[in-house]
Image (spheres, rainbow, N blue to C red):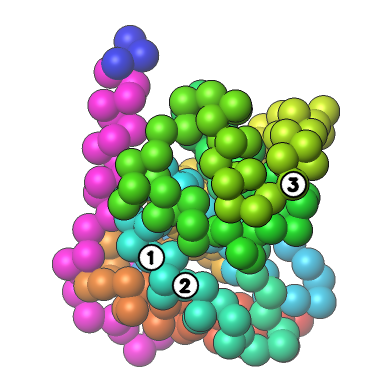
Amino acid sequence: MKRLAALLFATLVSSFVLSGPALAAEPQEGREYKLISPSLASPKDKIEVIEFFSYGCNHCNDFHPLITPWAAKLPKDVSFRRVPVSFNRPEWGRLSRIYYALEATGDLAKLDAAVFIAIHEQRVQFKSDEAVVAWATSKGVDGKKFADAMGAFSMAAKIQRADQDASVARISGVPSIVVDGRYLINNEAVGGYDELLKLTDAVIAKARQERKGK
């Protein structure tokens, strides 16, 4: 049963097809996005964009160099947050802990891309916490602080919350983008990563307009 679940999950992740139709002038429910109900918690003063991802995902690895500069240029009324998900896979759970540990030690900006490179290009095997700490230390991270962050009592709750949010949003594969806690972008509606970001911009504009109408 576990093997079947893993195969099904792999199929879902690989369904991020970049061969969809051209974008419509106005994003349409059921085509360019799906409504999330109940909606995820979202800031009242910002339109929050969430990228659900995993360091273990090939598509996330390809998408990261594009979404990072895009996020840095977002308007002041938009915030960006990344959420590492495990889909209850222990090996991806460890990768989620790497993200949160780097965030806790202040090393995320410096080593975020390096984690992707280690996994997908250098084929580093993060099969144990000790291996992860050794790798982080080799990159100049304080090993003790990083190990403490990896083993923090709050870590399990963070990973559980991330997976719960992904479940509520009915996310079946990554990367997935949610706008304003309500709109799940449909990856299959676009023809590439650039179009995915353009569609996200369009949904942000929709969310902004709806907020003004309240």
The structure residue drawn at horizontal position 31% and vertical position 83%, both measured from the top left corner, is 24
**Which residues lie in the magenta part?**
4-31
Whether residue 152 is visible, yes or no, is yes
Q: At numbered mark 2, what does the secondary structure look like: helix, strand or loop?
A: helix
Is the Cβ of the residue at disc 1 closer than 8 Å to that at disc 2? yes
Q: At numbered mark 1, what does the secondary structure look like: helix, strand or loop?
A: helix
Residue that label 2 marks: 67
Q: Position of residue 127 (x, y in %)?
A: 47, 26
Q: Quadrant of the N terminus?
A: top left
The structure residue drawn at horizontal position 74% and vertical position 46%, both measured from the top left corner, is 142
Whether residue 28 is visible, yes or no, is no
Q: CA distance from mark 3 to mark 2?
A: 28 Å
Amino acid at dot 1: Phe
Residue that label 1 marks: 63
- Name the N-terminal-most of marks 3 and 1: 1
The structure residue drawn at horizontal position 57% and vertical position 58%, both measured from the top left corner, is 111
* Residue 137 shown left or right of residue 214 in the figure: left
Q: Quadrant of the C terminus?
A: bottom right
Residue that label 3 marks: 142
Determine the main secondary structure of the stretch shown in magenta: loop
